[in-house]
Amino acid sequence: MGVELPNRNTLSYNMADDDGDVSLSDRELVKHVRDALKSVQSGDMDKYNQLVAVIHTKETDYTYDEALLETSLKALSGTVSNIDFAHHEFLLSAVFGMSMWNYRPAVMDALVDLIISLAASNGNFVDSCLDMLVSNFKPPFYLLDKLNQDNVRRKKENVLSRVHRALKSIADLVPLSPLRLMLIVIQRMPTNYKKDYNIVEYVENMLKLESGELGELVGSTILMAVVDRLIDLDVEIGWDDILQDEPSNTSIFEMELEDMDEAADDDELSGCKFPGETLNRKSLGANIVAELLDNLMVRTFDHLESCKDAGRLIEVFETLLESFEITILTAYKSKFAQFVIFYACALDPENCGVKFPMMLSNLFVRDGRSELIRMSAVSYLASYLSRGRFLSTSFIVSMLKRLVDWCLEYSKFQGGDVNPKAHRVFYSGCQAIFYVLCFRMRSIMDVPRLKQLFLMPLEQILKHKLNPLLVCLPSVVAEFLRQAKAARLFTVSKAFIFDDLLESEHSREFGGLERLDMFFPFDPCLLKNSNSFIQPFFVFWSRVRTTYDNDEEVSSEEDDVDDFLNENAEDAIDDMMVRSSDERDLYLDEFDYALNKMSITPKYSFVGSQAEKPLRMPSRIRPSTSPESL
Amino acid sequence: MEGLNVSDAKLMVYVHPSKSNNVPQAILRELSSLLFSYIETFDGVVLAYDVDILDKSARILSGLHPYFGVRLKAKLLLFSPKPDMLLEGKVVKLTQDSIHVIVLGFSSAIIAEDDIRQEFKYKLKHGEERFASRSNKRHVIKVGTMIRFLVKSVDKEILHISGSLIPAQTGSIRLLDKNSEDVLLTDRGNKKRRESDGETKTRDHGTVGGNAFSLNNDHPIKKSKRHKIANNN
């Protein structure tokens, strides 16, 4: 724009002054720059233009002179009160347009000092200064691919440590600036449309801000924004992306299959066995999103760990919990973001690990929330209680007891027959109980005191006219009954066979359009890197010791009649029963197979270990939605 | 210090129906959202409030306006800095070019070199930057000093004040208070209130928003409100 290149002699003459009187030289320089700034108002733009041109140079320019730039910036910081928003627009836009990534540490320091001085000098500059600093959260594009290189990593550290220090300094000088910072950080957050790595870098900085000294002021808002972005990315990965290769002819809902013959270790490790194959099966779009999400989750997990080390996990968890209730719980098709809260619980089982299920059970038990919210909450609760390896049996029992008590109370006041739609909350509660018991019955049975605690009322619920066994997911009910029988819990004279049915008419009905009957949010996490964090705290179905572990195959199912089924139901399943012995053998194979399907996670995880046959589980995940709740 | 006053305001808070199970909390939240930002209606920044709910019941006119209004009587502690007021603050940064001050712990102020009277000279002593008076050796302004300054202009958006040390009654408070040097250390709070009272009587603040306005600086109440801020935050 017609700006002259600087005449080095005019600005740099002070640099050549003898070292004897540095302060004088600095003072003169400041005076020179001040004159340049003041002369603008009188119409003399020469010196000013030179100054602007100096600011515009980058390390890569041939005119770049580090010392000159550094000195000019320092001189400017010495006279910020003379910088005027109206008269020095070019200068300001040049300064605010500078990316710290383009310069060496000495220049970065000078620039940061200038920005701090500017922010403190005039209320009008505060936003621009914060904006400029926040824009440095992201590396320039030419460095984006090179972040693994040592020198780039050093540069990143140089830049970011200064940026965060500057934000803190500005907050010290302008105490209300964090309010603005919060808004700017959220506004400048990279959108989902650009699927690049920038978002990961940016979120890393947001989390750094959260854990830093400003965290107290801006932390909770920022953390919520991070969770929101996780959910945004999460819902972009559609189930179709995950399930597109579904070979099953029974449904499009792929499951994580678990081969009985496989060693349990193999099952558990399958998630990270073939890191090289990551995501190669998926369409490109889904790949990138999943990879980004995986990276973000890992950053968040790291952050949670650091919070734990700093002893502030419980505060952060409060925010997470609030965020969970607002965003994750109400999000339809949330598949991965919920593992953030799972991990936080795993890190602190005594506090966080208890608060989370308490909140969920409160949501479920108390009237006043929408049915969908209550059903989602109980699905989360069931999945959490089943999958959290860090939970004590007595705690699980106490939570189950709460559910059982509620269901019992509910059923007392309900007459009439099976009606999946009208009593959907009740059925979802019952299914949650069955599901947790599928995972935990063995450990509960080992403690007689716990066993007695809640089983009596449970039997009443099962025998109630509403007949939850008929309505809940057949696969869950079948597994539950099989274990109950092996544990000799109930008087079962006949077995209950669903013929490997994943779902039934009734379950579909109570699940509604959202298919909350099929919602098991903490099924194994399919993101490779995130999963490696989750894995140690996670109960895989293959590792679950069932009550029939030592018993042999279920025998003579045909001879047994389930007490809890009414006549109609029996008729209905009669058809499903296998009659000839050949058929029966075939069926038994399938049945065993089906019984191991306690996870509904899709067959092929994003981690891509296709060589192994993944776990199969009895229901599909169809996360909930309940927009009206907000 | 000037710029602080207590207002009696009659307010109407509109509560969202979803908050109807805990109206007092919703009201407090609503009022808290006013804190520390400039409110045009009050022509100032609300620093604290003490609220009295007048309505015992409220009605929703369905189809018309889902929110329900609750009438309140509130005492608001307002900070409304205006040009030519004398404010007090703590120096947080000092350069040859400027003195940065924070007033009441949240509002930032800057005094540029041109607005520092000639009496003060910038010095770098033992690595510590300071402005020292040529006439009174004891009159020194450095980081941590409480100073009194004149308001030149106020950026209401972010409550950024531009100040001046030109008038003679400005400078280090400790020095300006002739009577005792120790006042600042021992009983700063009392001293400030005394000054504040005096100034309130002699200066005209103009009108302050709200339906009613009282100039009565009710100190015990103020104190309790400050306490309340801490609780609310």
Image (cartoon, helix red, strand yellow):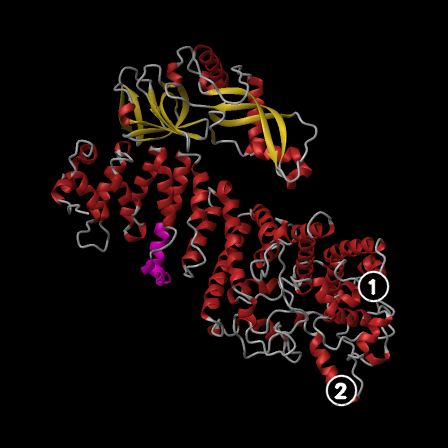
Instruction: Give the amino acid at mark 2.
Output: Glu
Q: Would residue A144 be counted in the magenta stretch?
A: yes
Q: Residue at x 77, y 85 (%)?
A: A584
Instruction: Give the amino acid at mark 1.
Output: Leu
Query: What chain does badge 2 belong to?
Result: A
Q: Which residue is mark 2?
A: A583
Residue A23 visible here: no
The quadrant holding residue A180 is: top left
**Label 2 residue SS:** helix
| Magenta extent | A141-159
Q: Which residue is mark 1?
A: A462
**Label 1 residue SS:** helix
Query: What chain does badge 1 belong to?
Result: A
Question: In the figure, B177 relative to A58: above or below?
Answer: above
Question: In the figure, A488 relative to B108: above or below?
Answer: below
In the image, B177 versus A121, the foreground residue is A121
Q: Position of residue A329 (x, y in %)?
A: 62, 54
Instruction: Residue lying at the far front in this picture: please name it.
Output: B63
Q: Residue at x 48, y 67 (%)?
A: A286
In the image, B74 versus B89, the foreground residue is B74
Q: Residue at x 46, y 45 (%)?
A: A212
* Helix, strand or loop for the magenta stretch, by majority: helix
Q: Position of residue B144 (x, y in %)?
A: 40, 27
In the image, B190 versus B158, the foreground residue is B158
